[in-house]
Image (cartoon, rainbow, N blue to C red):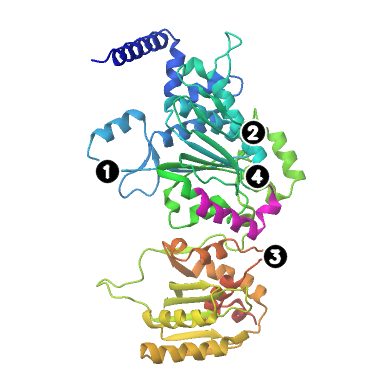
Amino acid sequence: MCILQGTDWMGSLASEYKAKVNKEGRPAEYKEAENSLWSYNKLINPKFFKESRPHLKVIATVLQAIFEHRIIKFPGDNEWRIIAAETKDGLDRSETEYTACRCLAIDIPPRHGKSYNLSQFCDWVYGKDQNQRIIAVTYNEILAGRFSVNVRDGIEATKADKSFTVFNDIFPDVHIKYGDSAKQMWSLEGQFFNYLGTGFGGTITGVGCSIGIIDDPVKNHIEAFNDDFLDAQYQWYTDTFLSRLEEDAIQIINMTRWNSRDLVGRVLSDEDGGDWYVLKMKACIDEQTKEMLCPELFSWNSYIKKKVKMSLAIFMANYQQDPVDLVNALYKDFKEYDSLPMDGEGNLLLEAVKSYCDTADTGSDFLCHIVYGVYNMEAYVLDIIYTDEDMSVTEHKVAASLYHNRVSWADIESNNGGLGFARAVARILMEEFGSNFTHIETFFQSANKEARIKSNATWVQEHIYYPRNWKNRWNDYYMAMKSYQAKGNNKHDDAPDCTTGICEKMGQSADDWLY
């Protein structure tokens, strides 16, 4: 046996024994803080993390639960549930199947401690597992540096007073690697890489993470209303940020909601939207009773003063987590169906299958084509094409949709090239599909577009039914309908315009009831 190996083994044993003695001699609250983020927070900063601020405990509880795989869904569940650690241990030992959530969206008013809670979470995670690698993305490099320093300084904090508790009191064996404590990228002792902080849109190539955090990516309402800005953010998120996430990594997006097309709105509306657990809190729980989320941090009087001075839409977004465009959205709700109308023997009861198509007016507009079934004066949406692709592409897509959905009557607006488009669709149906089943009717739409949309909005919401998964199947159309503003400028109106056409063609337009 090599003497050197034996010496290393004895030294390691001595170190483990010393660490064990040190841990066993610590106060009980230190041991509790090892296993509870909320207890850890209270020990580190008892003046801020208080039992009288229960929303902070909720944030800590949810953060710990997602880290420990305790936000779960059983087969058939529609909603996530948080289970106790003991229950989770029992599930792991059983054959019960479940899915653990790895995506968390935090929508909480400003100045309520959500970012501070996140930095505390990072420290606590490193105390629990030094193998964790975190990438934290904030609005810009300055804020990224500030967030990084808060996490790093929490671990490096020196105990100068016996009455204070620092990180190393609870996790005595965890330290920043000597000489590797740069402001925005650093490691723990024994590790190659643990933390990277960067501004949104920055470079994060060359490293991966087990926890990816995005903190308040939108600065103000000007950016929140800028479609190009929001599109660029989402593209960076999908093309860059997601590529840095390792298998089974945690995603956390922490932000004030501004717009249904902001980052949280996008991830919740895409095909993986159901993967997200949303922690949403409003500054005012009940205006009638003046109940506030945390009166110590934001009182009723402060709430009222800000509400009077601020734009109502901006105020509602910041403090009540109601996205600006949803506050002023024309359409508040939509009907959905799980199955089409059928008789007792399972036969479809649709009286006709029709379609309405509005071709793109300009190069920046969208073609919108909707196939719908008619039953009992109600419209059941069967297929949607909503795209800004060239007409040479959409002609074939619309023809295929008419053929495969067995559309008997197709209305196509003849405005702005629509007549030529309709002729091309008819030709493709005959030449490529060998079908003349669909009657194509062209017409000129001369009525004011905005007036038509607004006057028929109620009928659209009450009598047009979408399949339950429509927001995933036709996401761009869904977002266009949800975000269309009752007042103010709308970049695109093609989706509401075409949808209003269904109402008109079914003879239910508001104009039909005017004497």
Quick one: quadrant of the N terminus?
Answer: top left
Q: Amino acid at mark 1?
A: Glu
Disc 2/disc 3 C-alpha distance (Å): 37 Å
Q: Nearer the viewer, mark 2 or mark 3?
A: 2
Q: Earlier in the sequence, mark 4 or mark 2?
A: 2
Q: Amino acid at mark 3?
A: Asn
* Foreground pick, 127 / 312: 127
Disc 3/disc 1 C-alpha distance (Å): 49 Å
Segment colored magenta? 219-241
Q: Position of residue 209 (x, y in %)?
A: 46, 40
* Foreground pick, 142 / 423: 142
The label shown at residue 146 is: 2
Residue 229: say if magenta: yes
Q: Nearer the viewer, mark 1 or mark 4?
A: 1
Above-or-below relation of 259 to 455:
above
Residue position marked by numbered label 1 in the rendering: 97
Few, some or many residues within 10 Å of mark 3 (<14, 14–19, 20+): few
Q: Position of residue 112 (x, y in %)?
A: 62, 34
Residue position marked by numbered label 3 in the rendering: 489
Q: Is residue 506 visible?
A: no
Residue 445: say if magenta: no
Residue under the point 45% across and 32% down: 64
* Number of numbered discs: 4
Q: Position of residue 109 (x, y in %)?
A: 62, 40
Q: Earlier in the sequence, mark 3 or mark 1?
A: 1
Q: Main secondary structure of the magenta part?
A: helix
Disc 4/disc 2 C-alpha distance (Å): 22 Å
**Secondary structure under the numbered disc 3 in the rendered image:** loop
Residue position marked by numbered label 4 in the rendering: 318
Residue under the point 46% across and 19% down: 171
